Amino acid sequence: TNSFGTSNADFPPGDPGMYQLDVTLKRGQNLAARDRGGTSDPYVKFKLGGKEVFRSKTVHKNLNPVWEEKASILIDNLREPLYIKVFDYDFGLQDDFIGSAFLDLTSLELNRQTDVTLSLKDPHYPDHDLGSIFLSVLLAPGDQREATMLMRKSWKRSSKNNYDLLPSMPYRTGNFWHRIFCPSKCVLMTVVFVSSCFEHPLFQTQSLRLSDLHRKSQLWRGIVSVTLIEGRELKAMDANGLSDPYVKFRLGHQKYKSKIVPKTLNPQWREQFDFHLYDERGGIIDITVWDKDVGKRDDFIGRCQVDLSTLSKEQTHKLEMPLEEGEGYLVLLVTLTASAAVTISDLSINSLEDQKEREEILKRYSPMMMFHNISDVGFLQVKVIRAEALMAADVTGKDSFSKSDPFCVVELNNDRLLTHTVYKNLNPEWNKIFTFNIKDIHSVLEVTVYDEDRDRSADFLGKVAIPLLSIQNGEQKAYVLKNKQLTGPTKGVIYLEIDVIFNAVKASIRTLMPKEQKYIEEEDRLSKQLLLRNFIRMKHCIMALVTAVCYISSCFDWDSPPRSLAAFLLFLFVVWNFELYMIPLALLLLLAWNYFLIMSGKDNRQHDTVVEDMLEDEEEEDDRDDK
């Protein structure tokens, strides 16, 4: 790093107060080449205290990139340097390290814009010239603790308040003008504030202090739900003319990997992945397909990209993506759902309460339109209002369960939409409206509540399944949450208000057609209850067979002369009088045998039922222990 300036005497280096560091990442110069073509695809990460606080965009095929990106970072300890790391982005592979540097915050002067040039170094090759990074930094003091608490509270209130009357207005901060837009218009700009901006309660700062604060403050712009359905006509990579394909997904720093489907060119995955969308413009999901090879490097099959900026929100899109640099297709379902940070108080936008829109919907599904667009059977509106007394799934304090971070998933066939997450709350309020086009009136609406876990898959809290034909329009009802199999209740209730409008003629015609195949399916897992039930059934069959063989053997051995004599006479009678049409009468022997067991008190089926009932109670514990 280049040294510059002197330590400011106005504050000691260990000052426990909060500071705001405004950093402008300008450009890079003469960066090291990491690709075969003699270029790199550089991007920059800022780290503070070992945690990533900022990541720049990627500039492709350029050793002198220009970024001109700004970040605002809250600093609570000036002794911790700001680490700058530069990487070369590799599509589908691990990114290559270019170089790093650090910025000594104690060398900065307060309230003074300073241009900084940082020389990149690699600890393994300290003598190599890896290029330079040019920054512009401004360090300003301020009591940011109160501001941060205000920001968190304001985001939590965002699902309850409606700021439709807030106009688009400029606001002066230091030497810059920033335009702040009404949140209900789904526009949210990154705003850099100095200490004077905290006087207004409606203005929230977007702090890049910690990535954890992003998640807890619901600062992502939306959720992208990707369902990987299948692959078609993939390229054969193995000697047997087949492949063992799996798929990798990447959106920014978020990565997922599908399961491996062995020995096929037309794999069926039916797996679902959720991404957090931080860029309001969308972003691009990089998808690569690989062939799994044991003991050596996996083979590359092909790649494709999904440009989220071209997809409309609150709608499920079925995409057939051809693979580049390879053969075949991938079939995906992609749904973009806006988060609470963008859409505030969705209950203010109600299609059915607007008399004009309601009349248009009723007209669309009136009897006069019975032959227009046969596949569009009806209209469904679901208000997800709130839940109460949910199960506590998060551990806090001294290993005690206290809170959950619930969010709600609303599904109708292959349409799947999500609410935002309400953090640390067992009585969340979502107040969100979902609308669906009904393709089959016999469909079942499924509403599932999950607990968000940052580092693993979400925990199941409860579920309700509501047939569309059983819905009473306009009634707010409390539904008791049930377990995954919908066989018994679990803890909590959810309040929903549902409206269904449909054309009866279209619905009747659709009834005669095959049911729509559901692509989003849960992966089968081993069930202790089902395994033991099948074991008991097999045990009964084998024991009955062994008992019958022993009985017949005892008749031949004349262990009981009267019984053997009766069996001999029965044998003569059957052989003398047997006809083929009498074969079905053998089923009566099963009824007679069961009657004999009941009368003799040897029937064990009641005990087995008790065992199975006990196992049903244990199955929910298995679900919790499954992870």
Image: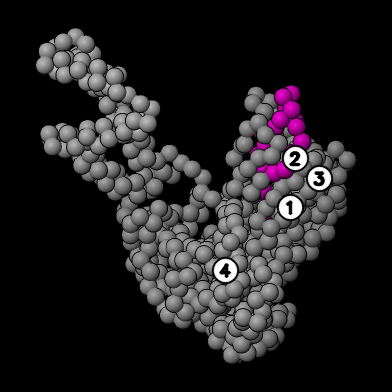
Query: What segment carries the magenta color?
Result: 231-251
Q: Is there a contact, CB below 8 Å, between mark 1 and mark 2?
A: no
Number of the front mark, 3 or 2: 2
Choose top left, top right, bottom left or bottom right for residue 563.
Answer: top left
User: If the image is split into quadrants, where does the C terminus sit?
Assistant: top left
Decide: few, some or many residues near mark 4? Use Cα within 10 Å; few <14, some 14-19, many ≥20: some
Describe residue 179's horizontal placement relative to residue 487 as left or right: right
Identify the residue under disc 2: 233
Which residue is outermost to the front? 577
Identify the mark nearer the N-term, 3 or 2.
2
Where residue 606 sits in the image (x, y, percent)? 20, 42
Please state the total of marks drawn on the protein image. Answer: 4
- Residue type indicated by callout 3: Glu
As measured in the structure, the alpha-carbon distance from the residue carrying label 3 to the one carrying label 2 is: 13 Å
- Residue type indicated by callout 2: Glu
Residue drawn at x 68%, y 74% as measured from the top left: 371
Residue 576 seen: yes
Which residue is outermost to the right? 37
Q: Nearer the viewer, residue 398 or 164?
A: 164
Number of the front mark, 3 or 4: 4
- Residue type indicated by callout 4: Ser
Identify the residue under disc 4: 508
Identify the residue under disc 3: 324
Q: Nearer the viewer, residue 278 or 246?
A: 246
Identify the secondary structure beneath mark 1.
Answer: strand
Q: Is residue 405 above or below residue 193?
A: above
